[in-house]
Image: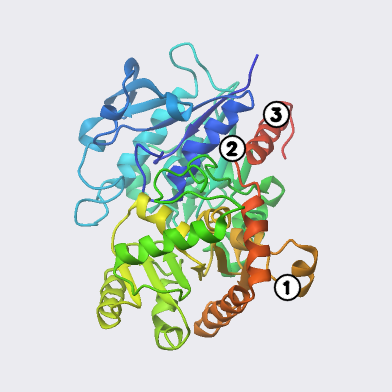
Amino acid sequence: MSLKVLHAASECQPLAKTGGLADVVAALPAALTAVGVEARVCLPAYRGVKQQISDLAWVGGVNVLGQDFGVLEGSLPERGLKLWLIDCPHLYERPGDPYHDMHGRPWHDNPWRFGCFAQAVAQLARGCNGWKPDVVHLHDWQAALAAAWIEPLPGRPRLVFTIHNLAYQGLYSRDEFNALQVPGYLWHMHGVEFWGGFSFMKAGINLCDAITTVSPTYAREILTPEFGHSLDGALRDRRSLLHGIVNGIDAEAWNPATDLLLGSTYGNRNVVSGKNANKAALKEELGLAPGEEPLLIFIGRFAEQKGADLILAARGPLLELPLQLAVLGTGDRQLERQFGEWAEAQPGRVALRLRYDEGLAHRMTAAADLQLMPSRFEPCGLNQMYAQRYGTIPVVRRTGGLADTVTDATAESLADGSATGVHFQHADVGGVLHGVRRGLELLADKTLRARLRRTGMARDFSWTRSARQYEQLYTSLLNGGHT
């Protein structure tokens, strides 16, 4: 009999997405299915989600705290995904994204919305419509609290919790703990209590059989006060259960040779002409001045984590360098305004698009010479992997998954042919400028540029290897192991 794994999460591409979590929750179960695991995804039935699934059917219901929730079953055949949706229109069918209203404000009842979702997941852990999971895999804080109700069940499934970003922990009050009827015996520091309130995230850390995060370096970093966001002590107590498994990417969607979102597809053999054609088209699209000047891009959230503010702080010296800059993202309103003012002041040199745009992200990645990722911390990151696949040289801060997936162009790595990008050490203006200057030096040497592009494009960032590692972890847990 094949291994059955239920993934529970608040996002799944293309049904609901605000960040990389959605990509992982879509790709990992599909990759597991491809290696023989029966995997399915459970998420809330947000507004518009049901309409995207043609074979959706009601297969049961659960009662959570006096409320009836429907369980809908369906699939996304083109992605190889089977789904359970938790249906409760007054909680989930709302305008905005999964967490915020149309004005970007968090929903006031998020603890209730995701606490109820977690309890529904716990009931599905017992089985539904003839399918019972061997492993329940919880993703980030929105699903973590399910462990509070699954962990004490006799004969329960094994529990795996993945930390995608430790900075977001689901911190709420004792009143909300009581309202959700979380088992009272968990109100202590080794349960879910956290500085007088409680943490959804701690349920995943303290109650699951294994904890994973999305890169080996980030797994080490979160054990320290600098990166642990006040949970480093809890994680150190459970470090024997902690694993770092690098995320993969959708190697079919992100393939420059077949990418229908590009004006000109290309491969390793015609990377120069292909990138030049895409660069010319993008410069025209974004209003950048035509020419051969190197193109530097930033794609990401305008948030402290991502270091977007460091680009602004370095804007004067950056434009003293021979480059153009294209920026795609949204986030902090003050940063949006400052980027907008910079782009207005530098027409032809700086282009800005304040939105989420999958197609433009592909076109920018194909057109760029350098991709800048100055993150203060980065659990895994995906854009640096997309960049390498498209022959774009990533310039990244040496942290988390960026350190694990980009090989710094040192004398040794250039000599042995393993170099794919540039690391810089410090999350400050000096670090950003050092990294970009090193990237420009590599670009200027046609031999080194070709070598980095060729090596990066040949790397295997598909999900298959990661899926095998998760399969081994699940099997170990079912065989009585703890790691």
Front one among 383 and 457: 457
Residue type at mark 1 is Thr
Q: x and y percent of residue 140 in the render? A: 48, 46
Residue type at mark 2 is Val
Which secondary structure lies at badge 3? helix
Which secondary structure lies at badge 1? loop
* Residue at 39%, 28% in the rendered image: 120
* Residue at 79%, 68% in the rendered image: 415
Which image quadrant for residue 54? top left
Which image quadrant for residue 390? bottom right
Q: Earlier in the sequence, mark 3 or mark 2?
A: 2
Q: x and y percent of residue 189 in the render? A: 54, 53
Q: Earlier in the sequence, mark 1 or mark 2?
A: 2
Q: Of circles 1 and 3, which is in front?
A: 1
Residue type at mark 3 is Thr
Which residue is disc 3 drawn over? 475
Q: Sort mark 1 into few (<14), some (14-19) or many (20+) by Cα contacts within 10 Å.
A: some
Picture disc at residue 410: 1
Are the residues at dot 3 and dot 2 in contact (C-beta closer than 8 Å)? no
Q: Sort mark 3 into few (<14), some (14-19) or many (20+) by Cα contacts within 10 Å.
A: some
Query: Is residue 116 at least partly visible in the picture?
Result: yes
Residue pushed farthest top? 130
Which image quadrant for residue 295? bottom left
Which residue is disc 2 drawn over? 160
Alpha carbon of mark 1 to alpha carbon of mark 3: how far? 39 Å
Q: Of circles 1 and 2, which is in front?
A: 1
Q: x and y percent of residue 255 in the render? A: 52, 45
Q: Is residue 410 above or below residue 170?
A: below
